Image (cartoon, grey):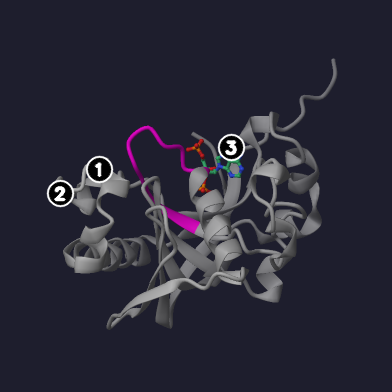
Amino acid sequence: AQPKEPALPLFYGWFLISEVEEKIKCSTMEFLKTLDTLEAFKKHISEFTGDADKEVDLEQYFQTKAPLHCTTEFCDYGKAEGGKEYAEQQVVKDSCGTGTELSVVGLIVTPRTFGARVSLTPEQLLLWPTGADKLGIPPADLPGVEALPVGSRAHVTLGCAAGVEAVQTGIDLLEILILQQGEEKAVTVEELELGTLSYMGQGRWYLALREPVTCDATFSSFSE
Ligand code: A2P
């Protein structure tokens, strides 16, 4: 009989340790509460509700996904392209179970997703798969993605609107970063205690944190 191939996981990534997870959930919910009450946000509320007169409770609007993590490689149990090659890399094998510090530098809110932007260190980039920033996105749909630095897509999905898949957070983040690089500069709407809040059109908000938030995390695979 042929020896059985080891099964591939659903995905690999850095998982926030539970104490940090709780802290991040609380502080990011606080941010949603703040955003909800801003006049600037209310002005664009219809992009979330479809109706300018309707209110939205952002804390309810986004469904939190657990456990909080930053995906590196989505293997889909072997159905996704490149998963096997990724899993076979020595650096991936050696890193499973090891700790690292993720640096959260910003938060994004769109009508679809709520996420934290992660800035990867050169060491962390060794675990970032080549092409991951573009994976699953037809280039024609996201012009400008090629020009972004490697690792731009790195993020933690904090929540998704009803019916939205988590994979959307990375796409929303890339879209915002492409807009930031473009000619049209974002409208800075508010200096908050947490950082600078910008509005990017079509219900897209970006908070550049004044101080990056460091999160202890463990690299590991995940299967359901
Ligand atoms: P993300 O990394 O943006 O949070 P799901 O729950 O949909 O099965 O996904 C499991 C994890 O894998 C999620 O964290 C999700 O998104 C990520 N993911 C799902 N599909 C893809 C994909 N095609 N490319 C990259 N990451 C994906």
Q: Residue furthest right?
A: 2
Q: Assess disc 1: are there few (<14), some (14-19) or many (≥20) residues with their C-alpha within 10 Å of its C-alpha.
A: some
| 204 or 62, nearer to the observer | 204
Q: In this view, does 208 lie above or below 135?
A: below
Q: Mark 2 points at which residue?
A: 55
* Residue shown at 34% from the left, 41% from the top: 161
Q: Residue flagged by tag 2: what amino acid is it?
A: Glu
Going by the image, does 215 lie left or right of 90? left
Q: Label 2, label 1: how many angstroms apart (C-alpha)?
A: 7 Å
Q: Residue flagged by tag 1: what amino acid is it?
A: Thr
Tell whether circle 2 marks a residue whose Cβ is less than 8 angstroms from ligand 1: no
Q: Mark 3 points at which residue?
A: 10
Q: Assess disc 2: are there few (<14), some (14-19) or many (≥20) residues with their C-alpha within 10 Å of its C-alpha.
A: few
Instruction: Check whether the beta carbons of the residues at disc 2 and disc 3 lie within 8 A of each other.
Output: no
Q: In which quarter of the image is ligand 1?
A: top right
Q: Label 1, label 3: how many angstroms apart (C-alpha)?
A: 33 Å
Q: What stretch is highlighted in magenta?
A: 156-167
Instruction: Check whether the beta carbons of the residues at disc 2 and disc 1 lie within 8 A of each other.
Output: yes
Q: Name the residue under label 1.
A: 49
One can see residue 219 in this view: no
**First in sequence: mark 2 vs mark 1:** 1
Residue 63 placement: quadrant: top left
